[in-house]
Amino acid sequence: VDDSKVLVVGATSKIAGEMARLLAHQGAKLHLVARNEERLIELATELARVTEVSFEVADLTEFGRAPGLVHRAVEELGGLDEVYVLHGDIGDQLESERSFAEAERILSVNLISVVALLIPIANVLEAAGKGRIVVVTSVAGDRGRPRNFTYGAAKGGLNIYLQGLRSRLAHTRIRVTTIRLGPVDTPMTAHHRKNFLFGTATAVARDIAFARANGDVYVPRYWRPIMLIVRNLPLAIFQRFGFLAGR
Ligand SMILES: NC(=O)c1ccc[n+]([C@@H]2O[C@H](COP(=O)([O-])OP(=O)(O)OC[C@H]3O[C@@H](n4cnc5c(N)ncnc54)[C@H](OP(=O)(O)O)[C@@H]3O)[C@@H](O)[C@H]2O)c1
């Protein structure tokens, strides 16, 4: 049995909920942070039957709260071993091309709020000398596509930030894992047409919870070769495929 002290940010996401269940059953002590109070209490109540759980409600775009959220987690857990960051919002791409407010919102939720959290998280773990940081980004960050490039820019920026953080912490025993996640059937993709490449929340939650690489991990794994091709396709060829260049 594992008795890790684990912070899960964005805990009410479908994938995070599945992951928290897995970690709880492994014996991890959990501190959950999410925006939706009702769903957070529901999840915490369920998990409390299995393990020790504490939680805090927060809109993560209130960036100034980030240090307090992290320090409260450390207090509640009595230390910190692992952090999983899963909140995100794909937003409205077309609206983000008409209105800066939507573009700003997408960049705030998916990039700036995560950086705000990673500053205190990295410093707390660095002081302890060990730990694991796992952040869920997206294959959308690998190449800008008309369908979701505002969100993709945020996730791609996050990939670079995490790469730098990993290098900064390379002399410590802190691992930084970037999960480049492919499409998954969750509320975020409720209105997207599903195809055979879609993952399920339960399967990807397992891959995320057990990823140990100090690097970038594609989940599911088949996205690594697919994105290698997508990243390298010349624009003229890229434009010919509706599933890549379409809206
Ligand atoms: N599903 C996919 O196809 C896919 C693909 C690649 C990457 N991802 C990434 O995977 C992660 C998990 O997403 P999911 O698929 O599990 O989607 P989900 O069930 O829709 O969860 C998204 C979560 O983000 C939270 N959130 C959004 N804005 C927030 C804010 N300002 N403050 C606090 N929480 C906020 C939502 O909280 P509320 O319930 O309060 O709105 C919700 O719990 C996200 O980072 C997403 O970008 C998903």
Image (spheres, rainbow, N blue to C red):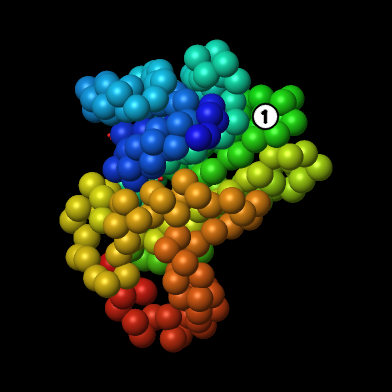
Q: Position of residue 170 (x, y in %)?
A: 77, 45
Label 1 sits on a secondary structure element that is helix
Counting other residues with Cα less than 10 Å from the Cα at mark 1, is it few (<14), some (14-19), or many (20 or more)?
A: many
Residue farthest right in this picture: 171
Residue 101 can be seen in this image: no
Q: Is residue 71 left or right of residue 90?
A: right
Q: Position of residue 112 (x, y in %)?
A: 51, 37
Q: Quadrant of the C terminus?
A: bottom left
Task: Residue under label 1, please give it.
Answer: 125
| Residue in front for this viewpoint, 177 or 209 | 209
Q: Amino acid at mark 1?
A: Leu
Which quadrant holds residue 204?
Answer: bottom left
Residue beneath the point at 60% across and 31% down: 81
Q: Is residue 9 left or right of residue 21?
A: right
The answer to whether 207 is drawn above or below residue 61 in the figure is below
| Residue in front for this viewpoint, 209 or 196 | 209
Residue beneath the point at 23% across and 25% down: 42
Tag count: 1
Taking the image as four quarters, which one is ligand 1 found in? top left
Which quadrant holds residue 8?
Answer: top left
Q: Position of residue 217 (x, y in %)?
A: 54, 59
The answer to whether 115 is drawn above or below residue 76 in the figure is below
Residue beneath the point at 73% across and 40% down: 173
Residue beneath the point at 74% across and 31% down: 129
| Residue in front for this viewpoint, 29 or 138 | 29
Q: Position of residue 195 (x, y in %)?
A: 24, 70
